[in-house]
Amino acid sequence: MNLYSAGFNAWQQLQFSSLSDSKDELDDIASFQRVLSDKLINIQYASLTCTIVETSTGIRYAGSVDEGVETGLKQKLLSSKAAVAGNGVIAIYDGHDTITQHTSLLQYAESGTSQVFPDMHNIIQLIAYETGFVALSGDGEVWTWGDERYAATLGREITAASPAERPGLVGDLQDLPSGKIRKIAAGGYTLLALTEGHDLYAWGGHPARQPILEWLSSSPSPVDVDESDILDCSMGETHIIVLNMAGDVYVIGENTNGQLGLPLERATKWTMVPLCPEEEAIVGVKAGQRSSFIITKNAHFI
Amino acid sequence: MTTATLYKTQLIKHCIEAASTIHDECAKILSAKDQYDPVVITETSLAGCGPALVDLLSRQANIVHSLYQNEGQTASSKVIITDQEETRTLQIYNLALKRLEDIASIAYTKFYAYLFKDLPVYWRQLYTDARILKFCLLLLRSPYTIQREPDIGSCHDAVASTHKHDCLDELVRTLDLALILAGAAGERTGRGWIDRALELLRLIWVAESEDGKTSADDDNRPSKRAKLVEDLVASNTGDGRVPIATFSTNEPFTPPVTHPIKKLEALSIDEFQTYMDRPGDPKLGPGPLIIRNSLNEWPALSTHPWNRPSYLLSQTFGGRRLVPVEIGRSYVDEGWGQKLITFGEFMREYIDHTSCSPVSSNRISNNTQLNPEPHNSTTPPHKPTAYLAQHQLFTQLPSLRNDILIPDYCYTLPPPHPTDPSIAQPELSAPLLNAWFGPPGTISPLHNDPYHNVLAQVVGRKYVRLYAPLFVSRLAARGRENGVEMGNTSTLDVGVLEGWDERAGEDGGELENAEAIEEKIAEFKALPFVDCILEPGDALYIPIGWWHYVRGLSVSFSVSFWWN
């Protein structure tokens, strides 16, 4: 398997070989570069400052490791059972039926008072964006909660019974034509959900900014990426990367740090990434806040 | 040594100090034991940003410092730099500039994620430090530093005067962003450093313009300096248009005053205290009051006249200083937004088109507005209103602060809110000053503030209407809207209910029949109020909790003083 990366590289978070001891500053990576080869590659964590990859020989780290990962939260952060939002709030799933929330890493460390959200069963993914969280259960239920000022990101109605700051079910993602939601992604002020039947949905938005997807709203709506079925998706702070069934990678959004891997200032429409390594098939994509990763497998082993 | 060179040397030293200070502070944080122990993170230290960002900032500070050292050594030793070395230096320089922009943008994302009052100060400091270091880098390649050779110190290529302008615009803008967006946070650098840097830059700018016209010795004559400042401003006009002398007094619409507020002549501080202590009705507390001729000592109304556009431009670095303006009729209307523009652009585009000329065509790309343009940003058929409202302009521009005096009345002991003491805010150590500057037709919708207020009118005329706190239940206070408490603002649109304005976008878009509208208007008109038109030199006392609607009638500049 191979790992390709592009984007923000100020802490060498995109490269796994230790370069020379040179103290020179590193520039960003503007087009996808192969950075790792191994029998097994599984990206466990990709943040603004670090990337953590599981390989056949153990865990590899690149960049400056996040403080949260340094604490006892590591396992949960790496397995998507805990997340830290842009506003410092931390949400942790206990593995059974409760999510607890702390206003900051400091508050968590000091075991200060926290909020408790019961009745959260079988959570398989817990992801944060700038001002809130989204959780996915094994049954395909999607829950959102966060700052009411950015109500569009919640993808659901805010009522007294279902307030912004407590997990509420995103009803629009139930009973979809192509089946239940099997994966979620979120970053910045945009959220994504992918169905078993390969349909991608998106919602969110910041009241004062151009959305990444033109028609983005507070209601989850299907995303058309060149009319293809979507196999994998991931969300950075201001960009999206997807992989379709045909094995093509598409990106959209801002490119200030080269996260699109393309020679553009930004992509306002879905744009294909021209990465077609010989004898390799693309099997997965992942986004850090300002970076993108593409994972390939030797074509013969598919 | 010319005056300009003297100031340039000081500014260079100032920048080297900033780079050292920032680097030292970062180094301390990074070397602290148990740096990963979150308990070590204090409330205010940059450490709260996390070791990765502190390290990145530290590295850039180091680069800035060594670039300055190299520049200094090269200048003094007159060593020839090879093309290769120059290219390498430029590479390092450009990457550092990019990284500082990255740090600022990472910090900036936090400004939205938190409620501003909850925003940890370390994010504001990170933003400020990144902007300060960027300023230092820009200065290094600008004409405002000491050159090795005459033709090397230009921003891009040639030292054309338009490029000189752009440099200055970007230098000022970089620091103003830190002042306005991040409150210039930071103990050792921060606001103090920025104010000094801008002052030195301004002195260099003035000195260089004077050097161009006369010998250095002449620049100490005040009259000459004042004339040259006006010339500097006039030279901005470029297209030969003669700027107007004073702002227009034209009032497109003047509402009637039907329940005049009491007016008194220049009360002493004791008389005012008495006025507050012995209200007509103790349950209602003291009422609003206009005090005439209490601002006569203000330079803004005499020797440093604010009603002269050229004076305001001269006090805002030739109009280059950035200000936050509100675009749209009122802050409760749809499509209302905030924007950061230069003072010159604000005056030219929104206040009075004849006040100054269009600026040079090389506009710096505006990727750091408070909020970018709204989605449907085609230019509207008529220009929207823009209002420089509720901005602490006098903290940002200390020179304008010298043109006003805090009224004695703000040093009295005011009474509590007559009906709702819970509204009270923590005691202010000094009155809060805000500037309100806009074209005819600016509107502050009916609202109340948790402080006593003296509203001083400096330029133009303003209509103000007040309703007593007693009537709060009939004033349709808003609730929580989009996650923001708006309880101090009324849904009632005075202008529309009085028939002065067309109905704008409806709140909630409910269709109402004519009867319901008539009823609403009748209910509204039954509410007792007092009103006035403030003239330049008037001061209006607005007691805490009194609801007020404010409308600029002509070009208007007011200053509010909040105290408790």
Image (cartoon, rainbow, N blue to C red):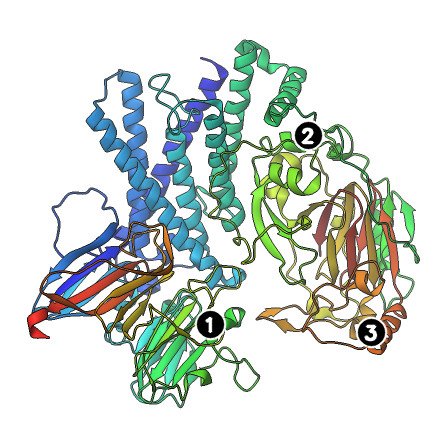
Q: Residue at x 91, y 53 (%)?
A: B262
Amino acid identity at mark 3: Ile
Asked if badges 2 and 1 are on one and the same chain, I answer no
Looking at this rendering, what residue extends furthest in the front direction?
A: A227
Residue B45 visible in the current orientation: no
Question: Whole-percent x and y of residue B246?
Answer: 76, 31
- Secondary structure, mark 1, is helix
**Foreground residue, A260 or B155?**
A260
In the rendered structure, find residue A153 and report the number of the disc placed on it. 1
Mark 2 or mark 3: which is in front?
3
Q: Residue at x 78, y 59 (%)?
A: B548
Q: Chain of mark 1?
A: A
- Secondary structure, mark 2, is helix
Q: Chain of mark 2?
A: B
Which image quarter: residue A237?
Answer: bottom left
Q: Chain of mark 3?
A: B
What residue sits right under mark 2 in the picture? B311
Residue B393 visible in the current orientation: yes
- Residue B161, placed above or below residue A256: above
Asked if badges 2 and 3 are on one and the same chain, I answer yes
Which image quarter: residue B143?
Answer: top left
Label 2 crowd bin: few (<14), some (14–19), many (20+), radius 10 Å? many
Amino acid identity at mark 1: Thr
Sequence-first disc among 2 and 3: 2
Amino acid identity at mark 2: Tyr
Mark 2 or mark 1: which is in front?
1
Labels 2 & 1 near each other (Cβ < 8 A): no
Could you tell whether B538 is left or right of A53 in the image? right
**Foreground residue, B450 or A298?**
A298
What residue sits right under mark 3 in the picture? B517
